[in-house]
Amino acid sequence: MRAVYVVLLCLTAWTGHSAVAFAQPLSLGRVEGPPIAVLDQERLFNQSQFGLRLQAELETASAELARQNREIEQSLAEEELALTEQRNVMPSADFAPLAEEFDLRVTALRDEQAARLREINLVADSAPGVFIELTTPIIQQILAERGAAAVLDARAVIYAADGADITSLALEQIDSVLGDGGDLPLFERLSVEDD
């Protein structure tokens, strides 16, 4: 700071002008929008065509899994009842292998359904990250066009100048570029990518 003061004094003495002239703001021209943009990532994902489609596919996969679980549960309950009735009329040596086979099948079905649930959860957990990867070039282009140097998450912003929030603009451009994600179901594509 002392060096700056000495330089200003020398310039004042050399030019004969007051140092106050150097304290005037330097104008670099008008920049459209603020240099920091605000983005609501949750809204961006939840309201984009891509996000809406993926959410619908996840809901469909979850509903299908629940339907399968109900059918399996009903079928196993009926089979268990029949097996219980057989236990009363069969010798235990003949019944034991049937009961063991039933238990093994129940365990295998539970494991299979649990694996399907894990797959649905993995896709749901990875989807926002994939979305961010796909939309980063679009967001970067918006920042470049606006002269913004940084993006803040809307949840961290208390106040912002008009025009700072680029979420609506980003939604329009993402929907225009990505659309709903293409022909292949997103759930299948993300399931394959996770493997």
Image (spheres, rainbow, N blue to C red):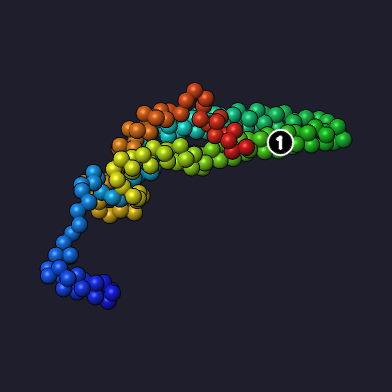
Q: Left or right: 106 with respect to 42?
A: right
Residue that lies at the very extreme toward the top in this rendered image: 183
Helix, strand or loop at label 1? It is helix
x then y, percent, for residue 113: 63, 35
Q: Can you tell which quarter of the image residue 188 is in?
A: top right
Report if residue 164 is visible in the image. Answer: yes
Q: Give amino acid for label 1.
A: Ala
Judge the density around disc 1: few (<14), some (14-19), many (≥20) Cα neighbours within 10 Å.
few
Say which of 30 and 190 sits in front.
30
Residue positioned 25% across, 49% down in the render: 34
Say which of 112 and 72 sits in front.
112
Say which of 158 and 1 sits in front.
1
Q: Left or right: 190 with respect to 88?
A: left
x then y, percent, for residue 114: 62, 39
Q: Left or right: 58 with respect to 151?
A: right
Q: Can you tell which quarter of the image residue 17 is in?
A: bottom left
Query: In which quadrant is the C terminus drawn?
Result: top right
Residue that lies at the very extreme toward the front in this rendered image: 14
Say which of 96 and 103 sits in front.
103
> Considering only vertical position in the picture, is 107 above or below 176?
below
Query: In which quadrant is the N terminus drawn?
Result: bottom left
Residue that lies at the very extreme toward the left in this rendered image: 17
x then y, percent, for residue 193: 58, 35
Q: Which residue is mark 1?
A: 108
**Number of numbered labels in the structure image:** 1
x then y, percent, for residue 183: 49, 23
Residue positioned 36% across, 39% down in the render: 141
Residue positioned 23% across, 44% down in the render: 32
Report if residue 63 is visible in the image. Answer: no
